Amino acid sequence: MDGGSRMNRLTHILFAIALAVSTGLLADKTRAIYALPIALSSIAPDADLRLLHRKLFHNIFVPLLISVSLLFLPPLLGVNAQLLAVSVLIGWFSHIALDAVTVKGVYPLYPLLNAKVSLGVCKSNDMLWNAVFSATSTTAILFYISKFAFS
């Protein structure tokens, strides 16, 4: 894989974690474990790169199905099923939202509606925009860490 795709993955992960900290999902150290499913689900939609990219997994139905399914799992290793489901939703929806900013856009209601949503601000491999989103997300994460570290 080229460096651009790795940068994009990092951008998705940082954006999702920043969104999670801003919602309070990672409000204390006991919830830090949920950063992992947030990060993984923030890059999971790109599993459709070779088949129906930006449609198959870049819609609202797949993460909703996964999250609802997680609610029915028995507690695993002390993990709260509701927080796990919300973590997946935050990670996945943050990916869809970030990709909607790009020229290629996303198809959030696929397969029910084959309509693209695109703000057309940038290309997904644009190094400058990836850097801007990554830096902004990192700043939000660091602000959150400093807020709780010094309180």
Image: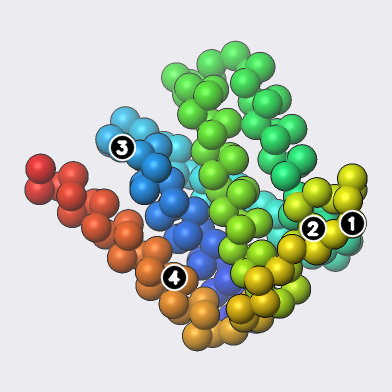
Q: Is residue 142 visible?
A: yes
Amino acid at the residue labelled 1 = Asn
What residue is rendered at 35% in x and 39% in y? 24
Quadrant of the image occupied by residue 99: bottom right
What residue is rendered at 36% in x and 48% in y? 22
Query: What residue would you read off at disc 2?
Result: 107
SS assignment at label 4:
helix
Quadrant of the image occupied by residue 118: bottom right
Q: CA distance from mark 3 to mark 2?
A: 32 Å
SS assignment at label 2:
loop
Q: Position of residue 115 (x, y in %)?
A: 85, 59
Query: Does the residue at mark 3 contact the one at mark 4 (Cβ under 8 Å)?
Result: no
Amino acid at the residue labelled 2 = Tyr
Query: What residue would you read off at disc 1?
Result: 114
Residue in the foreground of this view, choosing between 79 and 100: 100
Q: What's the mark number on residue 27?
A: 3
